[in-house]
Amino acid sequence: MSPSDTPPGPIPLGQENAALQPTPAEGSLKRLWKRANLPYKTSSFGVPDAAALQAPQETTKESRGSSIRWAPLNVGLERRLQTLVVLCHTLTIAILLTAFFFLCAIPLFWPIILPYLIYISLFSTAATSGDLSGRCDFLRSLGVWSIYASYFPARLHRSEPLLPTRKYIFGYHPHGIISHGAFAAFATEALGFAKLFPGITNTLLTLDSNFRIPLYREYALAMGIASVSRESCENLLSKGGLDGEGMGRAVTIVIGGARESLDALPHTLRLVLKRRKGFIKLAIHTGADLVPVLAFGENDLYEQVRSENHPVIHKLQMLVKHTLGFTIPLFHARGVFNYDVGLMPYRRPLNIVVGRPIHVVQQRDREKIDDDYINHLHSLYVQELERIWEEWKDKYAKDRTSEIEVVA
């Protein structure tokens, strides 16, 4: 695993003797602290306690009471840019749909818009063909994505290198509410995927319905995202690559899907995995090795209504899921100008750990795939996830309230 922590930098020039400078009187400091609306605490030496200088922690609203904390006006430019980028990413579909409807209001564009809608609704196969013709490495490598990743911050860790002469299926866990970690790690180069796994072209997969949304479809294709349908997966893992048959290619599937998002509660890790074996069959059919991925902190980015406390709401969510293929968790986090109410994710660390690959023996004929072999690979997959959890939980999940749990 490549190190992600950096040593503390040198003391800035001119501040070497800062500790020797005289401090203002306690009364002056106390007035400044009151003006900044911060609690005034002093150490045994009569100077403000260092804990009072730290940035506000984004704790849950329940742990503090009902008051809302507003963001101060003197927030640095770097943090403002981080917030802006994450906000734009969270609202990408809404922004692009608004732009599309604005174009629809201009008659000059109608001769283009109508054929475009017919094409993406009935004829386009770009999301399932496996050609990756719309993928733009320049867009994926833009510096704006580093700003996006530094908001949390997010980091990518590997357990061991992967051979570019194999093909892989990355299973991402948990789903969380929006899967911010999956996007940062596998749809951009913000976390250095190409450097950690040279020679491997990874494709993040999402619902096929997203490629029917005007303009957003073009954006997703440019980011190298493809459909999660079986046809798409098989094409991605059997075309291109070093040998023209998929060697050196990988796909990332968020295994738990929409159902798992309902269990995305902070400081817990419930994985909907026991009966999820379709990706195992896909790996056997295409000869792709399985690579479990565990994202510490993904469930901590949002708060949501607990289903056990509201069974009627939970039943309604499951009905929507079975009808439309996706669900709508009732969630909240922070806002743009406050730390307690809004749809922006909390600033909490994301650490995505890529596990060790599980070798798979290919069987092209689906009818001859043995159920015992499927169950064996599934067991190995779960064991590797548990190994990652046990190895890293004390470092990246210190505030956990429960251990990893694999459910149906």
Image: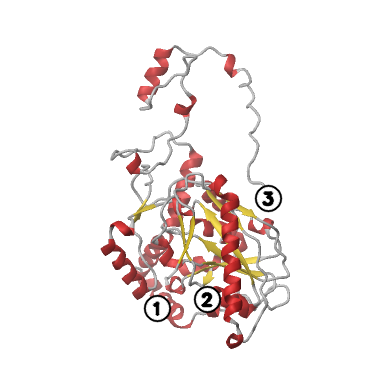
Q: Which residue is mark 3?
A: 2
Number of other residues with Cα within 10 Å of mark 1, as a class: few under 14, some 14 to 19, many 20 or more: few
Upstream in the sequence, badge 1 or badge 2? 1
The residue that appears at 43% across and 38% down in the rendered structure is: 57
Mark 2 → mark 3, Cα distance in angstroms: 32 Å
Specify whether 226 is left or right of 407: right
Mark 1 → mark 2, Cα distance in angstroms: 37 Å
Number of other residues with Cα within 10 Å of mark 2, as a class: few under 14, some 14 to 19, many 20 or more: few
Point out residue 397 in the picture as x, y percentages from the top left corner. 51, 47
* Residue 27 seen in render: yes
Point out residue 261 in the picture as x, y percentages from the top left corner. 42, 61
Between circles 2 and 3, the one closer to the viewer is: 2
Q: Which residue is mark 2?
A: 278
* Image quadrant in which the C terminus is located: bottom left
Between circles 3 and 1, the one closer to the viewer is: 3
The three-letter amino acid code for the residue at tag 1 is Leu
Q: Secondary structure at mark 1?
A: helix
The residue that appears at 41% across and 41% down in the rendered structure is: 58
Q: Answer yes or no: do the residues labelled 2 and 3 have beta carbons within 8 Å?
A: no
The three-letter amino acid code for the residue at tag 2 is Gly
Q: Which residue is mark 1?
A: 114
Mark 3 → mark 1, Cα distance in angstroms: 50 Å
Point out residue 161 in the picture as x, y percentages from the top left corner. 70, 59
> What colour scheme has been applied to the protein in the rendered image?
secondary structure
Point out residue 224 in the picture as x, y percentages from the top left corner. 57, 67
